[in-house]
Image (cartoon, rainbow, N blue to C red):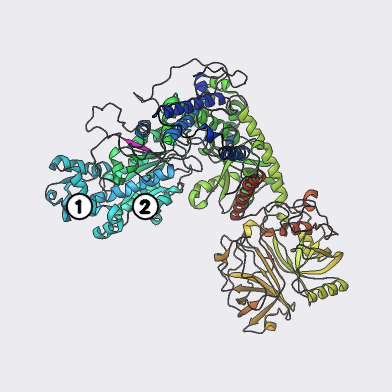
């Protein structure tokens, strides 16, 4: 190997010896070790070429010079080069910079160089680890990786000396999977098969060829009693311990001299894999067992129960405590009920680092609970899901065991500035240590093992557990490293490269406290520093509020605010504003650091704001701010340039149904009130590079300044200021105006219907146009004014436009006086006034005169669609005059419910799912029931449909030719005022509209929507920012798809 010159041209080059070893294991944020990677890879390809040349050297050359020099060959190579260059450049331009310490979005990081090179060498030599015949080396390597991981978790490995205790602990076994989800699935499969194995064995004894053991063969019940298996109840057999079940075949061999082949053949016809669990449940008259997991579990668990036939209904979600860990009181209650009702339990899953926030479930307590309930007759399998936050690899931070598989490096003296490590908390240490008592554990090398995907893994405390999911004869007492790995688990074929990748990383970095332990310790320290910066970010800030999910110790202990403030100031002075070298010398600061932050490396935080000194209490507004910040600090859309992102964070939603009291307390700390899930952001540092010098402080300052800018945007969005307000014009005998609403913009959060009067000449001109073109949409727009002032004063200046929803909008009148404005409906559609669910049937406000009636869909929940129709035809069982209000002489205060149009089943509407029922013409008759509105015209929700009382009429309606349908503008989240550049832009087939819409500004404030803004939205001239998640995702997916194919076309590459 060549000798490499040490790079001293960087402020990070003089660090501790431990960190310098870590630096040699990664390509580096700036590609500093590119030549190392390149030279070693070149050596790998050289070895491969030499090996191929040595294989039957007298064989002819199959690709000769004539072929290489041919036109077809050259063209094909050029094609390969073109596509590779395209793909490489596209990835470089758009992919997420996992390699940078500025990336803190997810539990994803740069793969280590040993893992990358291990994958490359394995991939070039072996494609399939399904059987040793195809993979003699890599199958053994996978066995070694499994043993290394078992040893790391505290399970006994094949290479450990046999302990003096009797009986000796079982030898563990592990294997590579494609990911944590498949490993979790396999563990659920094992738990299911294991639970029913004693019942299958009982049937083989009572009905099959094992009848001769019935009189004497005994089992140890979980409560310590002994009993003949043949007379055990189904409940007793469903609650044998894991070890007892695994010992059954061994004891049959030892006590009766039976071969394992005979046992397999005898039991096979009765196994759950052959009969299905329903047969066994029916034969033994037992209830379907349950599986328990935290409410904060990964979605792989519902998948696993579905695939294995356990059934999602039998997956019991245990609530979480205020720290988002599984609540032991609730688990205890569940197990107590199962014992009382004789409801068997397959397994309890302990999460070693939850997906959203990295909380570590109290595994030690779960093991204690199992011991407690076994004494009373209830036993179950315990699995640890350490996939997401890789709690398994964090076990390398535990105190070193007496012996390790991989030798420790010699200590070298530190030099210069240092990168510190943060130890695990005592709580987390105890849970990691307790993994050795669990029956199995999912660990993902492709996360905290810094290996390429796909390389998950599953480890068993007892190697015999793998035979519960074998598809061949189970030689239950065999220990060997030459098994066909594909025999066990879900997968068959799988890459040998995954095994070589993980093995090389383990051996080069080291599965010990000076290897992965040091690497993850640095990530833990980074996490603590990030937590300190974010937890104190808005101390003494007047308007911006940032709160971490994990509280400061003083806050968690319920101490007075003055004490919390003192602790906050201490952290700022002694950790946030101090370099690592000074923190190291400060024993109190180092001790404080060990108390701060979450269980592992995730910091969850959310923002809120004050408006005019008053804290925002609306969850929806805080969610908007947090989404805005996530969009600013992430790469999610085509136009997002990763090279301009100073920081990349993650985001998730904390759901009320999952987080309960923990979320309630968190919202209270943010100043929020009311129901609703909360959008939060996450910081997940996995890079070992950011904590020296001031990078973390710089990142925090960058985020803080951006948050202030976005806070201003949020304040502007919900503030009520003078703006242009538009109405759909309805009626020719009397003018009715239906307000064009927007859920998410403060100026437009009303649903309003009014009557008003125009100058006689304007009204006559409007009536003539409607008579000539009944389907034309006319809209009326006010000058810049507060909507409340318009409704109070009863007059304002307006302009009228024709066809804003068409390609050819036209100014009809401008600068005219609207008078005698009278309110029919005026109700808020702000988030706090909306219903939590859509109504069962579609309700409309019904209003008009005896001669002409109009409807406007009630906006009761967001997202929604504004559905407005003029001149509807009503066929009712009562005459329309009987519905007229005696005082006003108008139809008002009525609600028409389309009682066969199921809104809750239709919503939400969008461009891919339009309200197809809302079309003009007599052929589409809509049944309706008419009610008196039980609420005043200005009453706000929620609950506006409660107490409708008895119908005043029933019948049907058909829509007139003029309808207004909007599911875009009404759900718009961002300000949409056009810029000079936008208003001159043209969509395909759409003319420049600016000259057609005169008398109104074509660009201006973001939250004053002009007719030009509406025309641009309706004609697709500007980006749509929808409020509903589905439409946002659809727009994002389309953007990336278009970017990919446009670049292909630009390079003139074929699209297959």
Which SS type dominates the magenta stretch? loop
Residue 804: image location, x then y, percent: 76, 63
- Which quarter of the picture shows residue 696? top right
| Nearer the observer, 965 or 8 | 8
Q: Is residue 273 left or right of residue 623?
A: left
What residue sits right under mark 1 in the picture?
Answer: 202
* Circle 1: element type: helix
**Viewed as shown, does residue 595 lie left or right of 290?**
right
Q: What span is colored magenta in the figure?
A: 164-176
The CA distance from mark 2 to mark 1 is 23 Å
Q: Could you say which disc has been placed on residue 474 in the image?
A: none
Q: Is residue 398 visible?
A: yes
- Residue 61 part of the magenta-drawn span: no
Q: Is residue 231 left or right of residue 61?
A: left
Label 2 sits on residue? 308
Q: Answer yes or no: is residue 1010 visible.
A: no
| Above/below status of 357 relative to 826 | above
Q: Is residue 167 magenta?
A: yes
Where residue 386 sits: x, y (%)?
42, 39
Q: Residue furthest front?
A: 66
Where residue 541 sits in the image (x, y, percent)? 67, 38
| Secondary structure found at label 2 | helix
Of the two numbered discs 2 and 1 in the rendering, the one whose residue sits closer to the viewer: 2
Tell me the quarter of the picture where residue 187 sits: top left
Sort mark 2 into few (<14), some (14-19) or many (20+) by Cα contacts within 10 Å.
some
321, 866: nearer the viewer:
866
């Amino acid at each position: 190997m060549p000798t490499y010159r040490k790079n001293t041209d960087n402020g990070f080059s003089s660090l501790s010896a431990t960190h310098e070893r870590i630096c040699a294991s990664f390509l580096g944020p700036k590609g500093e070790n590119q030549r190392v990677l390149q030279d070693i890879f070149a050596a790998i390809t050289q070895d491969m070429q030499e090996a191929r040349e040595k294989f039957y050297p007298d064989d002819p050359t199959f690709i000769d010079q004539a072929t290489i020099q041919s036109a077809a060959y050259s063209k094909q190579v050029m094609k390969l080069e073109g596509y590779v260059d395209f793909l490489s450049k596209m990835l470089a331009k758009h992919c997420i910079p996992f390699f940078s310490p500025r990336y803190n979005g997810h539990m994803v990081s740069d793969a280590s160089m040993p893992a990358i090179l291990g994958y490359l060498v394995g991939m070039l030599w072996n494609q399939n680890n399904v059987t040793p015949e195809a993979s003699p080396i890599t199958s053994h390597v996978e066995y070694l990786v499994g043993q290394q991981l078992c040893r790391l978790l505290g399970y006994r490995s094949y290479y450990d000396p046999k302990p003096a205790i009797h009986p000796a602990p079982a030898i563990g076994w592990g294997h590579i999977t494609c990911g944590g989800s498949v490993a979790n699935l396999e563990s659920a499969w094992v738990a299911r098969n294991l639970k029913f194995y004693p019942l299958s064995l009982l049937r083989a004894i009572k009905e099959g060829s094992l009848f001769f053991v019935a009189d004497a063969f005994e089992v140890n019940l979980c409560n310590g009693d002994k009993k003949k298996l043949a007379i055990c109840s189904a409940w007793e057999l469903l609650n044998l311990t894991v070890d007892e079940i695994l010992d059954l075949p061994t004891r049959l061999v030892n006590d009766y001299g039976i071969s394992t082949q005979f046992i397999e053949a005898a039991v096979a016809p009765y196994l759950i894999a052959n009969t299905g669990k329903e047969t066994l449940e029916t034969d033994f008259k037992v209830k379907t067992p349950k599986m328990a997991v935290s409410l904060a579990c990964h979605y792989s668990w519902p998948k696993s129960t579905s695939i294995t036939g356990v059934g999602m209904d039998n997956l019991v979600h245990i609530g979480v405590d205020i720290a988002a860990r599984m609540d032991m009181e609730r688990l205890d209650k569940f197990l107590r009920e199962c014992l009382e009702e004789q409801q068997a339990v397959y397994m309890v899953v302990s999460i070693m680092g939850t997906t959203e926030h990295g909380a570590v479930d109290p595994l030690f307590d779960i093991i204690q609970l199992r011991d407690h309930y076994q004494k009373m007759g209830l036993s179950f399998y315990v699995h640890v899901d350490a996939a997401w936050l890789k709690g398994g690899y964090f076990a390398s931070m535990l105190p070193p065991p007496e012996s390790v598989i991989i030798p420790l490096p010699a200590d070298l003296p530190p030099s210069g500035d240092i990168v510190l490590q943060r130890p695990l908390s005592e709580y987390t240490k105890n849970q990691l240590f307790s993994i050795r008592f669990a029956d199995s554990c999912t660990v993902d090398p492709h996360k905290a093992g810094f290996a390429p995907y796909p390389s998950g893994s599953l480890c068993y405390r007892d190697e015999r557990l793998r035979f519960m999911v074998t598809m061949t004869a189970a030689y239950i007492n065999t220990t060997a490293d030459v098994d066909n790995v594909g025999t066990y688990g879900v997968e068959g074929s799988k890459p040998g490269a995954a095994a070589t990748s993980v093995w090389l990383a383990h051996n080069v970095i080291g599965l010990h406290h000076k290897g992965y332990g040091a690497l993850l310790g640095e990530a833990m320290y980074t996490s603590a520093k990030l937590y300190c910066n974010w937890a104190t970010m808005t101390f003494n800030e007047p308007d911006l509020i940032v709160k971490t999910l994990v509280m400061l110790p003083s806050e968690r202990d319920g101490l007075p605010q003055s004490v919390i403030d003192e602790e906050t100031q201490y952290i700022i002075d002694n950790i946030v504003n101090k370099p690592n070298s000074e923190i190291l010398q400060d024993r109190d600061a180092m001790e404080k650091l060990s108390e701060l932050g979450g269980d592992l490396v995730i910091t969850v935080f959310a923002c809120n704001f004050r408006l005019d000194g008053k804290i925002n209490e609306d969850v929806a507004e805080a969610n908007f701010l947090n989404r805005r910040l996530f969009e600013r600090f992430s790469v999610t859309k085509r136009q997002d340039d990763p090279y301009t992102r100073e920081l990349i964070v993650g985001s998730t939603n904390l759901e009320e149904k999952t987080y309960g009291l923990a979320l309630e307390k968190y919202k209270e700390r943010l100043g929020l009130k009311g129901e609703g899930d909360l959008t939060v952001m996450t910081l997940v540092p996995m890079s070992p590079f950011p904590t020296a010098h001031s990078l973390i402080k710089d990142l925090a300052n960058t985020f803080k300044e951006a948050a202030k800018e976005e806070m201003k945007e949020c304040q502007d969005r919900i503030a009520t200021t003078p703006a242009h307000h538009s109405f759909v014009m309805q009626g020719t005998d009397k003018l009715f105006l239906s307000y064009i609403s927007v859920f998410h913009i403060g100026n437009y959060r009303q649903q309003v219907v009014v009557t008003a009067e125009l100058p006689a000449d304007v009204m006559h001109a409007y009536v003539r146009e409607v008579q000539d073109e009944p389907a034309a949409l006319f809209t009326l727009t006010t000058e810049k004014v507060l909507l409340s002032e318009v409704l109070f004063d009863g007059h304002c200046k307006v302009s009228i436009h024709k066809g804003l929803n068409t390609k050819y909008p036209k100014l009809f009148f401008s600068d005219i006086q609207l008078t005698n404005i009278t309110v029919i409906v005026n109700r808020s559609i702000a988030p706090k006034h909306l219903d939590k669910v859509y109504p069962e049937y579609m309700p409309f406000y019904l209003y008009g005169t005896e001669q002409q009636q109009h409807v406007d869909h009630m906006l009761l929940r967001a997202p929604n669609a504004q559905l407005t129709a003029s001149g509807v035809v009503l066929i009712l069982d009562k005459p329309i005059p009987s519905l007229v209000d005696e005082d006003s002489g108008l139809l008002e205060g009525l609600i028409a419910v389309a009682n066969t149009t199921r809104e809750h089943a239709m919503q939400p509407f969008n461009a891919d799912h339009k309200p197809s029922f809302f079309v003009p013409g007599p052929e589409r008759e809509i049944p309706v029931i008419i009610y008196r509105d039980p609420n005043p015209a200005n009453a706000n929700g929620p609950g506006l449909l409660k107490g409708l009382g008895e119908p005043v009429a029933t019948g049907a309606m058909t829509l007139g030719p003029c309808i207004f349908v909007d599911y875009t503008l009404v759900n718009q989240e961002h300000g949409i005022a056009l810029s000079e550049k936008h208003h001159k832009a043209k969509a395909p087939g759409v003319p420049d509209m600016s000259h057609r819409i005169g008398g109104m500004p074509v660009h201006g404030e973001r939250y004053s929507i002009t007719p030009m803004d509406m025309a641009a939205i309706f004609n697709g001239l500007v980006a749509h920012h929808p409020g509903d998640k589905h439409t946002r995702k659809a727009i994002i997916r389309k953007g990336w798809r278009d970017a990919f194919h446009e670049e292909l076309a630009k390079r003139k590459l074929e699209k297959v």
